[in-house]
Each structure stands twice: as structure tokens, then as C-alpha cells.
Amino acid sequence: MAAYTLPFEKPLLDLENKIAELRQFSKDQGLTASQDAARLEAELVETRRTLYATLTPWQKVMVARHPRRPYTRDYIAAFVRDFTELHGDRLLADDLSIVGGMGWIGEHPVMVIGTQKGRDTKSNLACNFGCPYPEGYRKALRLMRLAAKFNRPIVCFIDTPGAFPGIEGEERHVAEAIAVNLREMFRLAVPIIAVVIGEGGSGGALGIGVANRILILEHAYYSVISPEGCAAILWKNRSHADTAAAALKLTAPDLVELGIADDIIPEPQGGAHADPAAAAELVRAALEKHLAQLLKLSPAQLLAQRYDKFRAMGVFKEGPLPALTPPPIPADNA
């Protein structure tokens, strides 16, 4: 895939271009790499570190959607040993926007399930841009029940803007499929870990997100609605997505503070897309740690912990609401 630069990464692109020009000049002149190139490389590292340490919520959303970010199949290929993919919901079709199968993470046999996006137009059409149909959720539930039957932990990778919102999804009862998954995931007496690796969009994410532990990558997001959708509802203009992103409290630190997520998985400098292999190693290590902890619990303890975790969400002490000044609406949208 061709290089892709996010709008706020322009200073990095400028430095990379300068370094490339200096190195090409040195090569053409038969010279060794100049001190200027070395100085610029050090500057590039520091600029990238500073930039990614101070991302706004909206910039984090852009990173979470980066087209070179690792997807579910990338993580499976990186560290799930002897993976055997399982297909179909046994009712209608095999939805390619949800991947699932058995394998091993370290010494633990697991059932892996995750939402999957494409890398180009053809693959995105095949997996519906990562937006599952009802049959995708029914496939996921079939595999979860299979895992529970054989006492295997379940690992779910979440990366979706949401369930498919079109007429086909409504005809095949997508809301019912997600609702059944929510109910049944509370009944599975095996450890469940959900990892938000990119986008965690609304009920489409929650359909495989009822877990004992919810982990989230440093630059991923998890939200009841996309920033653009929120802006369109509140201010009738999607251009205010940056304001909405800040208001939604959708970043990893916000989610841990609110008790939604349990742990933040750090990303390599510059985001997971900058070093997918390093990102995969960090995700593997986090999964092994949490699997080892959860496997010490009895089935009754797992069920109680999962239920209590979700019952506690949204419970807060009374206090003043934060002030949120709506941005001005452009004249043509007034």
C-alpha cells in the first residue's frame, strides 16, 4: 500500500523528505551520509515522540482509522499459533467482516473472533468495510458457544465503525442479533477478553465486546457514536467532529478512568501502523498476562465478575455537568 500521511503528520513527512534528499545527494556524489542527515533523523524521532504524546481526541480517531493500521488477521498471523478459521453462521451466510477460529496464544488454547477491514476497494467490499451483517454476529455467537463447550477462553478483536446500517441488515434483524449476543455473552462460563485495536463503534463493537477484561490500544477509541455522527446530531454539521470527539470521552485514558476499559496497551512510537510487528508483540504480551489471571477464576467467579463489571458502568456520584459550548453553526447550515 502506498504511504499515507495523516494531516497532523505533515511535519514528519517534511523531515522524511529532507532526509531522503540528503541521502540521495550523498549517494549521487559518492559521499558518506552527512551529519545533517543524522541530525535530521534525531529530530524526526523527537518530533514523532512529541507529536504522538500530545494527540487530541480527534487526532486519535484519525490514527485509529489509519489504513495501514494492523487489523484482526494481522494479529492472528503474528502470534496466534495453529489458527484454524471457522466459517458461516449455519443460518444464512459467511460474513467476512467477522473472522473467527481456534488457535493458541502462548500456552493457552483460545477461540479468536474479530471484526476485519480491507486494505483496498476489493477487499473492503468483500468484508463490507468492517461493518458486520447480522450473520456476522450470529457466526461470532456460534463460535463463542463452541468455545464454551470445549472450555476455551475467547479473545475478541474490535475494529469496526459499527454494524452495517443498510436495509439488508434491518431485513435480517441486526439489532436482534446484537442483543442476543449481549445476553448470551453474559452466560458463557469461560474467560472473555475484548481488545479494541482500532475503531470501537457503537453496538457494532459491543456485539462482541461483553468481556471480563476490555483492553484498548493507546490510540484506539471506543464510543457510543462516531464523532461525525455526534456532531451532526448536536450541531447539524459534521465539521465539528473534533469538538464532539473531545466531548465523547472516547480515548483510552478516558475509558479507563470511566471504568469502561481495564488496561491500555501501549503502541510503538508513531502508532501501531508505524511498526505492526512491535504492536503485535505488545498485544500478545497483554493477552497472555490477562489470560493467565482470568484462568485462575472459577466459572462462577467469571460470570459474576463480568456481570458486576457491566452493572457498574454509568454509575456516578451526582455533580455539576461539564460546560460544553457548542461551536457556531455556519450560515449555510443555520
Image (spheres, rainbow, N blue to C red):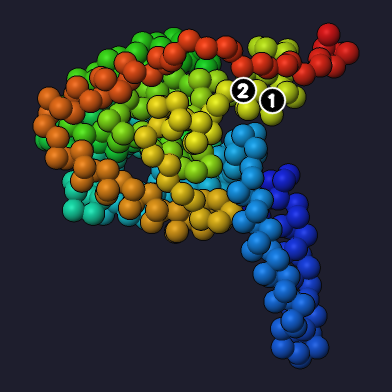
Does 123 sit left or right of 322 as displayed?
left
Task: Give the numbered dot on residue 243.
Answer: 1
Viewer-proximal residue among 210 and 143: 210
Q: Secondary structure at mark 2?
A: helix
Counting from the top left corner in percent of width and height, residue 208 is at 35, 27
Residue depicted at 59% across the width and 54% down the height: 270
In the rendered image, which residue does mark 2 sit on? 247
Mark 1 crowd level (few <14, some 14–19, many ≥20, 10 Å Cα): some
Q: Looking at the figure, which quarter contains the C terminus?
A: top right
Q: Position of residue 271 (x, y in %)?
A: 55, 51
State the separation of the CA atoms marked 2 and 1. 6 Å
Looking at the image, do the residues carrying marks 2 and 1 touch, with CB atoms under 8 Å apart? yes
Q: Position of residue 275 (x, y in %)?
A: 51, 58
The residue sitting at 53% across, 33% down in the picture is: 251
Type of amino acid at the residue the image marks with label 2: Ala
Mark 2 crowd level (few <14, some 14–19, many ≥20, 10 Å Cα): some
Name of the residue lying farthest toward the right:
331
